[in-house]
Structure formats: structure tokens, C-alpha cells
Amino acid sequence: MKKTIAGVSLLVALLAVAAAGTQSAGADLAIQSASGFGQVHLGLPFRNFAFSATELDGTVTGQAQLERRDSGILIHIDIDCLNVLGSIAVMSGVVTSTNSPTLPVGTDELFAVQDNGEGPSAPPDEITLAFSGLGIACTDITDPGVLAPFLITIESGQIQVSS
């Protein structure tokens, strides 16, 4: 119960920071942005995620928090690359905090999300798992079609992608 409350608190804090950053920067300065939160279920207990990334004047800043509830693994990523390809955003960065011995601080991570629209008739948004140690930047992916086999429907939450 404490982990769930802490996770929700962290999610709210991340979203508040993302919203504050976007408001103070001004809407017309943002070249690209992606943010979201939610859960996926892959035959295991839920995996939670929250992220926010913005490119302003060629500089990308952002953060992601990933939690595997079955193992208790919690990973924090500083996002330093954002590539918006239509309704898909590809992000990459470096692990800055972790409790996993197999994903040490400094490991590079890459993941993508798809914003499938809003409203009751829109299909659910999607996310990939985080890929570790690929050694590529998000801008190395130029064809969103290569991501299609890796996208997983989120079971709850919301993703926003804009350019």
C-alpha cells in the first residue's frame, strides 16, 4: 500500500513539474513534446510508467519513471532525446536512479509511445517497453513503422504527443 501511495505521489509530482515547465516556457516555444502516465499488463502484475519530455530551442529535457510491480524494480531516466514522428514519440536517455542490479545507473534506455487521440471512440494509447543498452539515440529511428511490432496497448492512463 505504501509503494502504491508513493508511486501515485511521484506520478502527480512528475506531471505537475511537466505542466509547470510547459506553462512557464510558453506554448509557442515548444517544438515537440510528449507526456503521459499509465499501466500495462503483460501476463505479470502491472507495470506503471510516467514521463514528460519537451524540446525547446533544440534542447530536450525530460524524465521518466518506470516501475515493475511484480519485482519492485523502480527506474528513473533523464530523457535527453525526443523525436516526434506524427503521433509517435521516441525518447531516449540515461538511467539516473535504480534499484535493479541488472540496470545500473548510466545505462542508456530507449522507448516510444503512440498518442491515438482523445474521446470515447479513440483507441487506447500505446507504449513500448524500455530497451536497454542499444547505444542509439531516439533520432536514429526515422521510420515509425519499425516500432509497430513493439507497441503495447496501455490499460489505463493517457499519452499526449505534439509537435
Image (tube, rainbow, N blue to C red):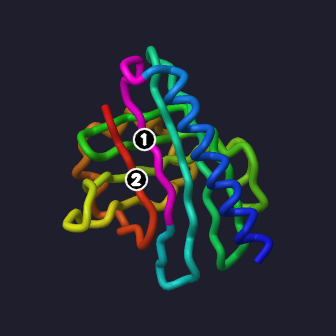
Q: In which quadrant will I find the C terminus?
A: top left
**Cα separation between marks 1 and 2:** 7 Å
Name the N-terminal-most of marks 1 and 2: 1
Residue 98 vs 31, above or below: the answer is below
Count of numbered badges drawn on the protein: 2
Q: Is residue 30 magenta?
A: yes
Residue that appears at 58% across and 33% down: 20
Q: Quadrant of residue 7?
A: bottom right
Q: Which mark is residue 49?
A: none
Image spot of residue 95 (x, y percent): 67, 45
The three-letter code of the residue at mark 1 reads Ala
Residue that appears at 56% across and 38% down: 18
Query: Helix, strand or loop at disc 2?
Result: strand
Image spot of residue 87 (x, y percent): 26, 45
Magenta span main SS: strand
Question: Which residue range is magenta in the image?
Answer: 27-38
Image spot of residue 115 (x, y percent): 31, 52
Q: Which mark is residue 159?
A: 2
Which one is nearer the viewer's eye here, 22 or 47? 22
State left or right for residue 143 relative to residue 66.
Answer: left
Residue that appears at 47% across and 71% down: 40
Which one is nearer the viewer's eye here, 161 or 98? 161
Instruction: Give the crowd class for mark 2: few <14, some 14-19, many >=20 residues within 10 Å.
Output: many
Q: Is residue 132 magenta?
A: no
Q: In which quadrant will I find the N terminus?
A: bottom right
State left or right for residue 121 relative to residue 150.
Answer: left
Residue 98 vs 15, above or below: the answer is below
**Disc 1 to disc 2: CB gap under 8 Å:** yes
Query: Helix, strand or loop at disc 1?
Result: strand
Q: Which mark is residue 34?
A: 1
The three-letter code of the residue at mark 2 reads Ile
Residue that appears at 50% across and 30% down: 22
